[in-house]
Amino acid sequence: MNLNRKLILTGAIALHDRAIAADPRNEAAYINRGSARRFARDYDGAIADYDAAIAIKPNASAAIANRG
């Protein structure tokens, strides 16, 4: 992974960390952070985020589809 892509993904993950800290029930923030983690090849972190989104909103279709 090149440095620019890594910096962008790190920033996206940090942004969603702040969104989750502000509203822990925001399933969209978990889904988006999970996607950023997936692209950063942090697959365990991505699955954990998708699971958190599903726990908040069981019919969160994006989380379900991305989790597989």
Image (spheres, grey):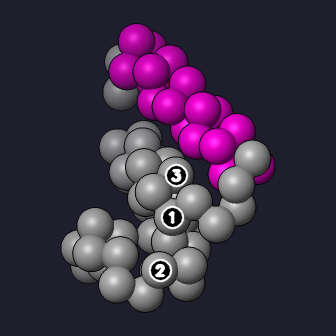
Above or below — where is 17 with respect to 42?
A: above
Task: Name the residue: 35% across, 43% down.
Answer: 39
Task: Name the residue: 70% across, 39% down.
Answer: 18
Q: Could you tell me what secondary structure mostly forms the magenta stretch?
A: helix
Left or right of 62 on screen, residue 13: right
Q: Residue lying furthest right in this view?
A: 21
Q: Specify whether residue 66 is in view.
A: no
Q: Going from the N terminus, do you reach mark 2 or mark 3 first?
A: 3
Label 3–label 1 contact, CB within 8 A: yes
Q: Which mark is residue 11?
A: none
Type of amino acid at the residue the image marks with label 2: Lys
Residue that label 1 marks: 27
* Region of the chain picked out in magenta, as a range: 3-21
Type of amino acid at the residue the image marks with label 3: Ala
Task: Name the residue: 64% across, 43% down.
Answer: 19
Q: Going from the N terminus, do you reach mark 1 or mark 2 first?
A: 1
Left or right of 14 on screen, residue 9: left
Q: Quadrant of the C terminus?
A: bottom left
Residue placed most toward the observer, 18 or 45: 18
Q: Residues within 10 Å of mark 3 (few under 14, many from 20)?
A: many
Q: Which mark is residue 57?
A: 2
Element at label 2:
loop
In the rendered structure, does residue 5 fall within the stretch colored magenta?
A: yes
Q: Residues within 10 Å of mark 2 (few under 14, many from 20)?
A: some
Residue that label 3 marks: 29
